[in-house]
Image (tube, grey):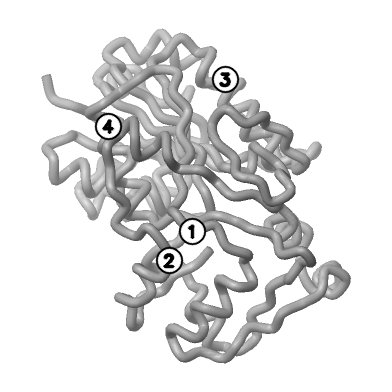
C-alpha cells in the first residue's frame, strides 16, 4: 500500500518534510488556508489542498492517508490565541481509516519557565503564556483522540530562509539580557525533518519527545555570537526594562522564559544524530543563507 502523508498547515517545517518524504516514495498532500500557497505546494509536487479547517477536507483524501502531521498554528479569536484541534479532530478520527501514525508539532513553551533548570519530557508543564497553554490543550486533544499520535515539542526553529542574518546585518537587532542570564534552546529545521522521518519508521503512539539541539544558550549570547560569525554589527542588548519599552509582548515572552531542554530521549529512542548539534555547526557553513530564531 502506498504511504500517503498529509501535512496540516504545510508551512516552513512541513514543506521540508514533504520534500523528504517525496524522495522516499510517499504520496504527499499539504493543506493551507491560502490558494496561493496551495498552488506553490503543487508546483513542488505536493498535492496542495485549500481548507480553512481539516474537518472540511474531502472524505476520499482522508480515507487514503496513512501518515499525518499537524503543524497548524494557533488560531486568533476574540479571546486571544486558541488551539482549534478540539473543534475538528473528533470529526477527523473516524474518517482516517488507514492512519498508521500521526504527529502533533508542539512547542517547548508548554513547560513554562524553569528558572534555568534542565527540562525533560517528564517535567511538569506549567505554561505561563496563552500560547503555551493552548499548545498543551492541542497536545491533549491528539493524545486522547484514539489515533496513533505522538507529540513533538520543538525548541526555537532556525534554518534557511529565516531572516536573522538580514536583521543583524541591518544593525538594529535587539535582544534582552537578563540577570542572571535566561537560557533558551533551538533546533535546525533539517534536524526536525530527521526526527520525524525516524519516528515514522519507529512509531510509538502516545510518545512525547523534546526536539532541541545540544546547546541551550541565552538568546542575547546566541545573537552576539552569530553576528560575530557572519561579520554583522553587534546586536543592541537591552535591559529587561528597556525590553518592555522596545519589544512586543510576544518577543519579550520569548526572551523571558528560562529553561534548558534535554534531548536525551530523542536520541535514545530514535537513534538519531543531529546534523547541527549546535547553532555553530550551522552558521559556520552558512555564507548567504538566511537563518532565524
The mark found on residue 272 in the picture is: none
Q: How far apart are the two marked residues, 4 and 3, measured between alpha carbons? A: 20 Å
For the residues bearing labels 2 and 1, Cβ distance under 8 angstroms: yes
Q: How far apart are the two marked residues, 1 and 3, measured between alpha carbons? A: 31 Å
Counting from the top left corner in percent of width and height, residue 115 is at 74, 48
In this rendering, the label closer to the viewer, 4 or 3: 3
For the residues bearing labels 2 and 4, Cβ distance under 8 angstroms: no
Q: In percent of the image, x 55 and y 36: which residue is there?
A: 120
Element on which disc 4 rests: strand
Q: How far apart are the two marked residues, 2 and 4, measured between alpha carbons? A: 30 Å
Q: Is 284 left, or right, of 105 in this rendering? A: left
Mark 2 or 4 closer to N-term?
4
In this rendering, the label closer to the viewer, 1 or 3: 1
The mark found on residue 141 in the picture is: 3
Mark 1 or 3 closer to N-term?
3
Counting from the top left corner in percent of width and height, residue 124 is at 67, 29
- Few, some or many residues within 10 Å of mark 3 (<14, 14–19, 20+): many
Q: How far apart are the two marked residues, 2 and 3, measured between alpha carbons? A: 33 Å
The quarter of the picture where the N terminus appears is top left
User: Mark 1 highlights which residue?
Assistant: 215
User: Of residues 227 and 11, which is closer to you in this image?
Assistant: 227
User: Mark 2 highlights which residue?
Assistant: 279
Q: In percent of the image, x 44 and y 54: which residue is there?
A: 214
Mark 2 or 3 closer to N-term?
3
The mark found on residue 5 in the picture is: 4
User: Of residues 215 and 146, which is closer to you in this image?
Assistant: 215
Amino acid at each position: 500500500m502506498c504511504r500517503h502523508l498529509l501535512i496540516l498547515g504545510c508551512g516552513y517545517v512541513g514543506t521540508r518534510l514533504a520534500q523528504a518524504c517525496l524522495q522516499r516514495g510517499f504520496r504527499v498532500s499539504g493543506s493551507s488556508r491560502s490558494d496561493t500557497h496551495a498552488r506553490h505546494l503543487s508546483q513542488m509536487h505536493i498535492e496542495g489542498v485549500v481548507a480553512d479547517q481539516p474537518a472540511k477536507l474531502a472524505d476520499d483524501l482522508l480515507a487514503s492517508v496513512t501518515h499525518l502531521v499537524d503543524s497548524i498554528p494557533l488560531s486568533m479569536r476574540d479571546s486571544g490565541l486558541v488551539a482549534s484541534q478540539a473543534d475538528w479532530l473528533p470529526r477527523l478520527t473516524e474518517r482516517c481509516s488507514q492512519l498508521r501514525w500521526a504527529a502533533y508539532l508542539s512547542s517547548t513553551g508548554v513547560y513554562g519557565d524553569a528558572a534555568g533548570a534542565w527540562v525533560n519530557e517528564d517535567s511538569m508543564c506549567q505554561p505561563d503564556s496563552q500560547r503555551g497553554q493552548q499548545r498543551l490543550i492541542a497536545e491533549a486533544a491528539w493524545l486522547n483522540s484514539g489515533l496513533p499520535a505522538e507529540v513533538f515539542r520543538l525548541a526555537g526553529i532556525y534554518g534557511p530562509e529565516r531572516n536573522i542574518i538580514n536583521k543583524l546585518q541591518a544593525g538594529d537587532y535587539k535582544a534582552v539580557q537578563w540577570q542572571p542570564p535566561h537560557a533558551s534552546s533551538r533546533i535546525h529545521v533539517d534536524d526536525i525533518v530527521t526526527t520525524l522521518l525516524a519516528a515514522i519508521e519507529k512509531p510509538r503512539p502516545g510518545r512525547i519527545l523534546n526536539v532541541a539541539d545540544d546547546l541551550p544558550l541565552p538568546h542575547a549570547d546566541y545573537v552576539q555570537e552569530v553576528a560575530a560569525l557572519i561579520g554583522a554589527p553587534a546586536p543592541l542588548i537591552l535591559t529587561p526594562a528597556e525590553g518592555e519599552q522596545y519589544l512586543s509582548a510576544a518577543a519579550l515572552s520569548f526572551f523571558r522564559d528560562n529553561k534548558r531542554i534535554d534531548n536525551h530521549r530523542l536520541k535514545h529512542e530514535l537513534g538519531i544524530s543531529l546534523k547541527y548539534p549546535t547553532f555553530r555547526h550551522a552558521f559556520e557553513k552558512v555564507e548567504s543563507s538566511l537563518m532565524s530564531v
